[in-house]
Amino acid sequence: MKDIKLAVFDMAGTTVNEDNVVYKTVRQALVNAGVAVDLDTVLEFGAGKEKLQAIKDVLVHVGAIERVDALAIFENFKRMLKQAYFDLKVSPYEGVEELFGTLKANGIKVVLNTGYDQQTAQALLDKLNWKVGDKIDALITADDVVNGRPSSEMIDKAMEMFQITNSKQVLKAGDSIIDIEEGQNANCGITVGVLTGAHTRSQLETINPTLILDSLPELEQILFGENPK
């Protein structure tokens, strides 16, 4: 595989198992506003996006964008999510922490990026006891850029942070189509779709990632073979 120096991972559904609570909460906020929508639709049109944009895109799809206030739904969503996260038990997917350790031992920077705002993302990290400078090298959220996914801005920012000028040395992994589009827009050397989260294999195949994996720790064998450091 390519000479990777930076690995950028999505959070929920990719590295963090939070039982789709964010998208379940998006759906409930929409339902509370009188918009009948199922979870599969929310995942299909909202997964991986900054959450106000996700709400708007779902509303466009169901033909409700003109009759409800997307911003009011978003504000209600944030209030609901704060309580949901307070009650929620979250965990890393099996083998993910070990993968991070192997990447770092091989000189690869590990960055998390997300369509969440800073407060939501930090709440997840706190529950996992993941700290920047320890388990991960950086966290980049939707609050840190002007344009969210599928724009390459979060990956561009990560590259700037670690003085990486060759995008072919960057790996981007996520569980949604928009994660792959983000990596492709950043011209990453490797884009990885993982089947632990929002989108199915057939959905991810439509965007042609470099790899589709059942679980993220499979990367260790692919990148390092039998004997990683």
Image (tube, rainbow, N blue to C red):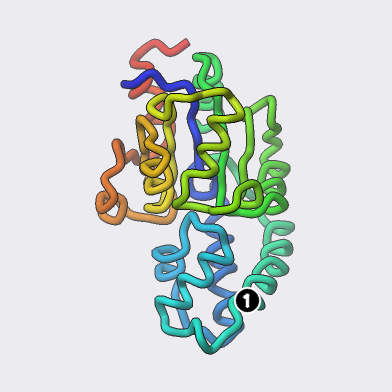
Nearer-the-camera pick, 100 or 7: 7
Q: Nearer the viewer, residue 164 or 85?
A: 164
Name the image quarter holding residue 80: bottom right
Mark 1: few/some/many CA within 10 Å (<14, 14-19, 20+): many
Q: Residue 62: horizontal and vertical position, in percent?
A: 41, 80
Res 225 → quadrant: top left
User: For the residue labelled by badge 1, is the local secondary structure a helix, a strand or a loop?
Assistant: helix
Q: Position of residue 220 (x, y in %)?
A: 41, 24
Q: Indicate left or right for 22 with 196 as reference.
A: right
Tell me which residue sits at (70%, 46%) in the image: 122
Residue in view at x 58 percent, y 75 percent: 28
Along the line of sight, which residue is nearer the eye, 28 or 47? 47
In depth, the one of 152 and 125 nearer the eye is 152
Which residue is at a point 46% across and 68% down the rendered structure image? 42
Residue marked by disc 1: 73
Q: Amino acid at mark 1?
A: Ile
Residue 82 x/y as whole percent: 72, 62
